[in-house]
Image: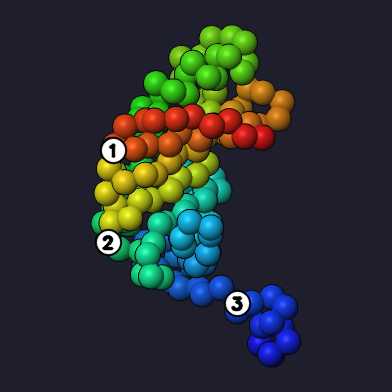
Amino acid sequence: MGFLSRVLFGKPPRRIEHPTFGEALLMSAKHGSYWEVETEVGGTPFIVAIETTDEQEPSEAQAEFFKRFARNPDLAFQRASALLIPEYEKWVRGPFPANWREGFKFTSMSVPLRGDEHSPWDLSFECLKDRDGHLFTCTFQNGLPKELQVDG
């Protein structure tokens, strides 16, 4: 990359190949850095944001944290359901389906520092029953669902 390009666009983001996550791109954000990964969970596209400090590569504990939910999306829904279900019923103005997969698709998550679920992290689900495909993101603090944000 030439000098002028670096001045105008900054240095190119760092990329790594991780044994669990595959290709990861280091992203700088207002409140720190994270590794962004585009992968698949259950055969569908899935985004993972892995928190980091000092550009450290994802740890084994972070990989295990991710795999726990990637292998079992039902666990992800179960962890967030107390906030997801009431908000879903407000958005679609109807009852939540008996099978959560008829209402939501698990689409993304963040992985906390050190894979410690007591640090902040989140799980996101796309609503399948509204026309706009709103994204419902459940934020966790101290291992418990804390807040739900709806985007879209």
In this rendering, position of residue 6 left or right of residue 74: right
Residue 123 place in picture, x, y as percent: 44, 39
Question: Is residue 74 among what the camera can see?
Answer: no
Q: Residue beneath label 3, please?
A: 12
Residue type of the residue flagged with mark 1: Asn
Rate crowding at label 3 as few (under 14), some (14 to 19) or many (20 or more) other CA atoms within 10 Å. few
Disc sitting over residue 60 in the figure: 2
Could you tell me if the residues under marks 2 and 1 are in contact, i.e. CB atoms within 8 Å?
no
Residue drawn at x 66%, y 83% as measured from the top left: 6
Disc sitting over residue 142 in the figure: 1
Residue type of the residue flagged with mark 3: Pro
| Label 3 to label 2: alpha-carbon separation | 26 Å
Q: Nearer the viewer, mark 2 or mark 1?
A: 1
Residue sticking out furthest to the bottom: 2
- Secondary structure state at the residue bearing disc 3: loop
Question: Mark 2 vs mark 1: which is more N-terminal?
Answer: 2
Residue 61 place in picture, x, y as percent: 26, 56
Rate crowding at label 2 as few (under 14), some (14 to 19) or many (20 or more) other CA atoms within 10 Å. few
Residue 12 place in picture, x, y as percent: 60, 77
Residue type of the residue flagged with mark 2: Glu
Question: Looking at the figure, which quarter contains the C terminus?
Answer: top right
